[in-house]
Image (cartoon, rainbow, N blue to C red):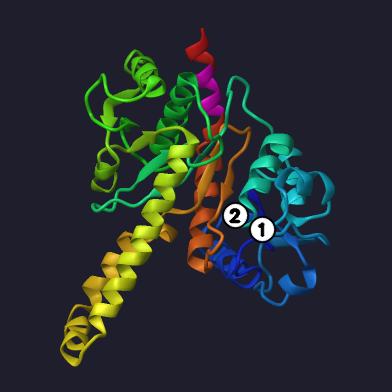
Amino acid sequence: MKLAIDAMGGDHAPEQIILGVNRALKELPDLDLLIFGDQTKIEPLLEKESRAEIIHAPDLILGTDEPVRAVRRKKQSSLVMMAEAVASGEAAACVSAGNTGALMAAGLFIVGRIEGIERPALAPTLPTVNGAGFVLLDAGANSDAKPEHLLQYAVMGSVYAEKVRAVSKPRVGLLNIGTEEKKGNELTKAAYKLLSSTPELNFIGNVESRELLNGAADVVVTDGFTGNMVLKTIEGSALSIFSMLKTALTASAKSKIGALLLKEELRGLKSKMDYAEYGGAGLFGLKAPVIKAHGSSDANAFYHAIEQAHKMAQANVPSIIESQIASGKE
């Protein structure tokens, strides 16, 4: 299987990207890669005799670039050339840690939308205390949504949870301000009716944001405005808690001894709550898997994003989504 990689996107490109690539090539024996970026910077980092081809991309889309304009004007950028490789069928999926808006624009305009999907959704997998994680969508691809969009998000999230994350009959929850059926605004009330009347979904009703990390559902759907705030709140809270914990554990000789005794337990806790272990955010609803790795991805995070794209392509997730969307319209 051949995937396309943007080696120049993200805070630590291309060094950490290529380290993740090297690991993926070792651990996924059926994997071949097309790597787009500055050949002079990539070549020294890539392990020799690997199953990867470097395609030189002279342009670079920056995090500060206006997304649509950048995709249209920087045709020779690593991000755009990567998306074109997927659109042409040369690669089965692609991964980038670069400009989120530009990747979404390239996915929509170059890779293309699945027939019947009205709005693609950005879908990260977030950690839970039991280590299972949950898929959140939409996390920011569309600020506004209609009830029909949330239904499509639920279908796409369920397919992904089942086929890639191996969750049997994924529990779908609707993010709301209370668990009662009548709670919420016009969007959530209408979406509740649609979701509860779709027998193909294992819809469990409304879920509150305070229960998300406790594993209240395997798939959580909401509009992109709300989802993005939830995503950033979880990320920010996790970083703040670990920062406070580190300060407390290094405040005195006694606490340092305690930290030493708890070293393995603390490492396990950090791993359980680390976004890097869950891969990137999938842009669901496109004709091929497009994965957005976190902008600050290190080698471990980028490896898991590649692994995620590999699993999605292997399981043929876009085709299954297309089939289920089509059957729902009949």
Q: How many marks?
A: 2
Q: Amino acid at mark 1?
A: Gly
**Viewer-proximal residue, 209 or 25?**
209
**Mark 1 / mark 2, whichever is N-terminal:** 2
Q: Residue at x 50, y 38 (%)?
A: 315
Q: Residue at x 74, y 43 (%)?
A: 68
Left or right of residue 69: residue 231: left
Q: Amino acid at mark 2?
A: Leu
**Viewer-proximal residue, 221 or 322?**
221
Residue matched to label 1: 63
Tag 2 secondary structure:
loop
| Residue 169 percent across, percent down from the top left | 31, 30
Q: Residue at x 41, y 22 (%)?
A: 187
Q: Residue at x 36, y 36 (%)?
A: 219
Magenta stretch: helix, strand or loop mostly: helix
| Residue 221 percent across, percent down from the top left | 40, 32
Residue matched to label 2: 31
Q: Which residues are magenta?
A: 319-325
| Residue 164 percent across, percent down from the top left | 43, 41
In the picture, residue 179 is in which quadrant? Answer: top left
Tag 1 secondary structure:
loop
| Residue 190 percent across, percent down from the top left | 39, 16
